[in-house]
Image (tube, rainbow, N blue to C red):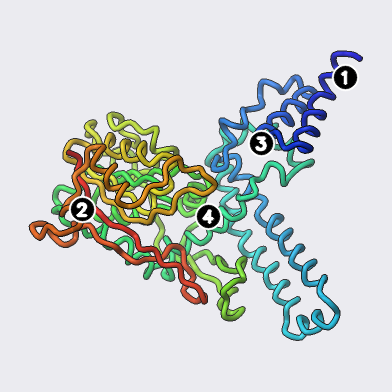
């Protein structure tokens, strides 16, 4: 048997054994698949990027491809729902028809097409904004796209897209104002204690900034703000709002954020309602101008000594404030996260936190700590909580004291279910 034949058959044998005995994880399957492709595309071998390095679940390549395929993936779900309906008995099928269930499925398909105007727009913006990153992987995607679309789109991609659509509501619509006011107000109150005359010289970092409404609102107080976000799902959606060719007027776009999840719905009118956005059109600050700046990437890689955005504030000692909202519990290693927050702050700098402790699922979080354990680590890495850990120090203003704030996150205020977080708020100083 020739060496070439062995080289061609070996990947197929390994894939079979992996499926048969479950000895490989998904990344290894992909690696073997890409290697086998390279045997037949020798001239392109050097152009195919590493899947692990540039095709992670939150990468530009993965999220752009997912946004492009939102409609197809969603309509596949509708097809499965239709098949489920058709599987019931004739009598039950007739009752379903009489109450309008098939029409409900038709309406969902219609709203998917309307939502795809947003997702296709995001994909278009990403194609222009990230042309270099996407062009470097165009060969890889074209080779896989026609043979295994569901294999290169992460199974969680659809839920991440839908989460982004909900964030348009939470961050950039009038409908999200009530939720924003509850979780933003404590943070903005702390930042409002400084006089307006000094705010423009203060650097604020907002890691895990999502669609950046909090960072934008802080910049409106007069601070120089760097919003840092790892997920290209969020960054692509925010770029959709920033693009003057796509978003030209207030409330220009309409999204149907709740159409996909039919549990806890009171009626189809609420389920299929549309919400317009944005209530304001955000803008990034110009170079060397105080305002909102965007840094796309992992905040764990930031260096306090190097400004990460073109900014009027060139303080190389670090940030004056780090603001974390629903963020620290996304940490794989919470101790590393708190150490990085401490490292990025200038001496005497202030950390403002609000959020729950919903640790990463599937054992991704290496440490899953209680609140008291987190506060122990906060002090161990070099922070002092303002107003004491129990919030009993009456010598400090009420807005600075640690407290519990009941709140929601991307909630549907017309649903039959409410998920209330008992989120913890504290202000800490770097000692």
Badge 3 marks a residue whose secondary structure is loop
**Residue that lies at the very extreme toward the left in this rendered image:** 395
Q: Are marks 2 and 3 in contact (CB under 8 Å)?
A: no
Q: Which residue is mark 4?
A: 246
Residue 350 in percent (x, y) is at 21, 45
Q: Which residue is mark 1?
A: 5
Alpha-carbon distance for marks 4 and 1?
Answer: 51 Å
> Which is nearer the N-term, disc 2 or disc 3?
3
- Crowd around label 3: few <14 · some 14–19 · many ≥20 (10 Å): few
Location of the N terminus by quadrant is top right
Alpha-carbon distance for marks 4 and 3?
Answer: 40 Å
Dividing the picture into quadrants, the one containing residue 384 is top left
Alpha-carbon distance for marks 4 and 2?
Answer: 47 Å
- Crowd around label 4: few <14 · some 14–19 · many ≥20 (10 Å): some
Relative to residue 407, is residue 316 drawn left or right? left
Q: Are marks 2 and 1 in contact (CB under 8 Å)?
A: no
Q: Which residue is mark 2?
A: 389
The residue under the point 78% across, 27% down is 11
Residue 25 tag number: 3
Residue 391 in percent (x, y) is at 18, 58
Q: Nearer the viewer, residue 269 or 264?
A: 264
Relative to residue 41, is residue 115 drawn left or right? left
Q: Which tag is nearer the camera, tag 1 or tag 3?
A: 3
The residue under the point 67% across, 38% down is 26
The residue under the point 76% across, 63% down is 79
């Amino acid at each position: 048997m020739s060496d070439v034949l062995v080289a061609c058959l070996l990947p197929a044998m390994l894939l079979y054994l992996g499926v048969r005995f479950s000895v490989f994880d998904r990344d290894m399957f992909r690696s073997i698949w890409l290697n086998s492709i390279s045997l037949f595309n020798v001239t392109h071998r050097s152009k195919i990027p590493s899947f692990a390095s540039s095709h992670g679940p939150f990468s530009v390549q993965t999220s752009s491809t997912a946004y492009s395929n939102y409609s197809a993936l969603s309509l596949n779900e509708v097809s499965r729902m239709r098949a489920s309906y058709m599987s019931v008995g004739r009598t039950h099928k007739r009752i379903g028809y009489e109450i309008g269930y098939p029409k409900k499925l038709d309406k969902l398909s219609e709203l998917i097409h309307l939502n795809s105007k947003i997702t296709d727009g995001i994909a278009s913006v990403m194609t222009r904004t990230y042309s270099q990153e996407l062009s470097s992987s165009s060969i890889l995607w074209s080779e896989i796209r026609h043979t295994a679309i569901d294999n290169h789109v992460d199974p969680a991609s659809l839920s991440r897209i839908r989460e982004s659509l909900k964030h348009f509501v939470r961050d950039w619509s009038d409908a999200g104002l009530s939720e924003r006011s509850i979780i933003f107000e404590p943070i903005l109150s702390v930042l409002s204690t400084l006089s307006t005359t000094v705010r423009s010289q203060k650097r604020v970092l907002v890691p895990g900034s999502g669609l950046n409404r909090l960072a934008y609102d802080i910049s409106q107080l007069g601070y120089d703000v760097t919003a840092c976000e790892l997920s290209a799902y969020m960054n692509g959606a925010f770029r959709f709002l920033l693009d003057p060719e796509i978003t030209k007027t207030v409330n220009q776009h309409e999204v149907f954020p709740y159409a996909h999840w039919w549990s806890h719905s009171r009626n189809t009118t609420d389920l299929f309602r549309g919400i317009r956005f944005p209530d304001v059109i955000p803008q990034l600050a110009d170079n060397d101008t105080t305002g909102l700046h965007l840094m796309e990437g992992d905040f764990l890689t930031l260096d306090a000594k190097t400004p990460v955005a073109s900014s009027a504030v060139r303080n190389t000692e670090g940030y004056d404030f780090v603001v974390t909202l629903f963020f620290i519990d996304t940490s794989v290693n919470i101790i590393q996260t708190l150490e990085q927050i401490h490292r990025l702050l200038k001496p005497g700098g202030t950390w403002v936190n609000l959020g729950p402790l919903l640790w990463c699922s599937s054992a991704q979080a290496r440490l899953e700590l209680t609140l008291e354990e987190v506060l122990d680590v906060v002090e161990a890495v070099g922070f002092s909580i303002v107003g004491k850990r129990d919030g009993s120090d009456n010598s400090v203003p009420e807005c600075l004291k640690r407290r519990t704030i009941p709140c929601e996150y991307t909630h549907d205020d017309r649903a039959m279910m409410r998920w209330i977080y008992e989120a913890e708020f504290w202000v800490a100083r770097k000692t």
